[in-house]
């Protein structure tokens, strides 16, 4: 399976997402700050970075991904945001974003996006999406 870095400043959401992806067999790294996300992304070179767009502190998720992509340009990036008005901004800010997920989202949605990103299946992104894929789904860690 894949090594996935989650950059999320909400510890509960980060833990739910980490558990859900870990149960699928992925090796999970979690960063609760933007700086930690950049450090882990550069030092551990994950297969996929799943980052929240709106992070408290010194930089947003797009900047985290830009800094990681400057060193690892082939890195797979999935952005998340609970601010629906930022969906297109998140997709356009950072060249190389594979998908943008609107929070909240269902477990099946994130798993499908990760599977497709890892398989380089670019055909799955809908034609109406912003620069990449855009999804409006609900997190359901119980199912």
Image (cartoon, grey):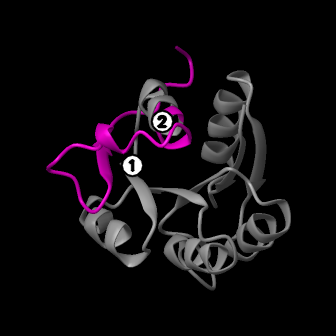
Q: Main secondary structure of the magenta part?
A: loop
In depth, the one of 123 and 6 nearer the eye is: 123
Mark 2 or mark 1, which is nearer the start of the sequence?
A: 1
Instruction: Please name the residue that numbered disc 1 is placed on.
Output: 101
Vertical arrangement, residue 65 with respect to residue 52, above or below: below
In the picture of the structure, the residue carrying the numbered disc 2 is 110
**The stretch drawn in magenta includes residue 127:** yes
> Residue placed at 52% from the left, 37% from the top?
119
Is 87 displayed left or right of 30 in the figure? left
Q: Is residue 15 above or below residue 42?
A: above
Using the rendered image of the protein, determine whether residue 27 is visible from the camera's viewpoint. yes
Region rendered in magenta: 115-143
Q: Dot 1: few (<14), some (14–19), or many (≥20) neighbours within 10 Å? A: many
Q: Position of residue 11 (x, y in %)?
A: 69, 51
Secondary structure beneath label 1:
strand
Closest to the observer, 118 or 109:
118
* Residue shown at the point (83%, 60%) measured from the top left: 44
The residue that appears at 66% across and 44% down in the rendered structure is: 12
Q: Label 1 to label 2, Cα distance in Å?
A: 8 Å
């Amino acid at each position: 399976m894949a090594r996935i870095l989650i950059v999320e400043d909400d510890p509960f959401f980060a833990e739910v997402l980490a558990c859900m992806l870990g149960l699928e067999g992925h090796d999970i790294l979690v960063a609760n700050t933007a700086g930690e996300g950049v450090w882990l992304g550069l030092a551990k070179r994950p297969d996929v970075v799943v980052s929240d767009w709106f992070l408290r502190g010194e930089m947003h998720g797009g900047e985290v991904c830009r800094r990681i992509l400057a060193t690892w340009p082939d890195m797979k990036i999935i952005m998340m945001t609970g601010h629906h008005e930022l969906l297109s901004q998140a997709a356009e800010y950072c060249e190389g974003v594979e998908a943008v997920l609107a929070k909240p989202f269902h477990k099946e949605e994130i798993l499908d996006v990760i599977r497709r990103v890892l398989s380089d299946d670019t055909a799955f992104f809908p034609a109406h999406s912003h620069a990449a894929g855009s999804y409006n789904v609900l997190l359901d860690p119980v199912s």
